[in-house]
Amino acid sequence: MQLSDRIANLKESATLAMAAKAREFKSKGIDVIGLSLGEPDFKTPKHIQEGAKKAIDSEKYFSYPPVPGYQDLREAIAEKLRKENNISCGPEHIVVSNGAKQSIANVMFALLNPGDEVIVYSPYWVSYTAIIELTGAVPVFIKGGIESDFKATASQLEEAITPKTKSVIYSSPCNPTGSVFTPDELEAIAEVIRRHENIMVIADEIYELINYTDDKVSLASLPGMFERTVTVNGFAKGFAMTGWRVGYIAAPLWLAKGCTKMQGQITSANCSIAQRAALTALTSDLGPSYEMAEAYLKRRELVAGLLNQIPGIKNNMPQGAFYFFPDVSHYFGKGDGETVINDADDFCMYILEHAHVSLVSGEAFGDPDCVRLSYAASEDDLKEAIRRIKGLLEKLS
């Protein structure tokens, strides 16, 4: 018996794979500091927990919810998008899913045919390409290097478009780089898309609440772009609700209906109680979310200072999310007499095995010279982790 070619050829998530290796080391009693997963180290705020408890106690939410989500939650999301993002939409444009990852998969399976091309801003989140390939479509990469804050340009986008181009996908704030598109950069993207009427943009805004700039513009809010854009968001990052698994899209009606149809055959609706918690999160005090963002900003400053003390490592200054994406190619070809580091994969394994810190290779994100470091960890852990890394790298020659 064999797996299907589809699954046999599917790449394992690099972030989850490294987290699994870190757990394996921990199971052996090794003190591993995990900086590989993009998971807030904060607990879900108490008032959101209480919203879920209240829903359970009411005994009103034990039945299957509507596939695209409860009406009041979709109304609250639409209201949030109108007030905070200047995106004019109604609840009929909203589909609530089991995390932003399922939201993206719904869109891609509803939109793409085999042979279609999807332009991917690179570096990119690891699952974009895997999902594209599952649909039979083809990812086409436009890359921004560290010298340009890892942001590809609108002219690169224009050059990459072919008659097969069906979609474009990016994240801002970006996972893995922390880069944020400025309003001018988004308008330049919009100008390109307006000239090509058959292309949909997937704008991943899951890190919206962890943005250290004043540049908080959604592509779908620009003139003529709502009908050309799928806005992806969710509750995992900004509300520390990773385990609740609630994400959503705002999309043109025809595509929202297609995603509902897709979801109806795969998972049906998102968990009823998680949806009630999400409604509480949206309609209650955002203070805890802002406090978390302030804590991440403080950690960014800490980590930037520490990384800058390691010779040979090059950084950009992330403007959002909670990652650094340093270029570590200075250490390629170096070794300790027994092991030689040939690439970012080797670098991460060497750091895990000898410094007991888990990172993720940039290869999976589209830049083989870099590694991703999550600073969603305590300040003490961050200081100790980078102390270990610095000490280990000093031994290489």
Image (tube, grey):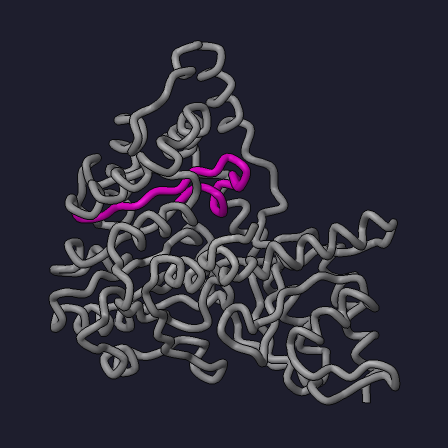
Relative side of 180 to 306, left or right: left
Which of the pair 279/216 is nearer the observer?
Answer: 279
Determine the image quadrant of residue 19: bottom right
Q: Quadrant of the C terminus?
A: bottom right
At x 37% / y 51%, what residue is drawn?
105
Relative side of 160 to 387, left or right: left
User: Looking at the image, can residue 323 be seen?
Assistant: yes
User: Looking at the image, can residue 73 be seen?
Assistant: no
332 over 208 or under it: above or below: below
At x 32% / y 65%, what residue is drawn?
137
315 over 385 or under it: above or below: below
Determine the image quadrant of residue 226: bottom left
Outermost residue toward the front? 1
Question: Where does the image place residue 181, in percent across and percent down from the top left?
Answer: 35, 68
Determine the image quadrant of residue 393: bottom right
Relative side of 63 to 262, left or right: right
Q: Which residues are magenta?
A: 234-252
179 over 70 or under it: above or below: below
Question: Where does the image place residue 219, in percent across and percent down from the top left?
Answer: 25, 60
At x 60% / y 37%, what residue is drawn?
43
Question: Where does the image place residue 149, in percent across and percent down from the top left?
Answer: 45, 77
Magenta stretch containing residue 150, yes or no? Answer: no
Which of the pair 102/78 is nearer the observer?
Answer: 102
Which of the pair 302/270 is nearer the observer?
Answer: 270
Question: Where does the image place residue 281, in percent across and percent down from the top left?
Answer: 43, 33
At x 57% / y 54%, what residue is drawn?
38
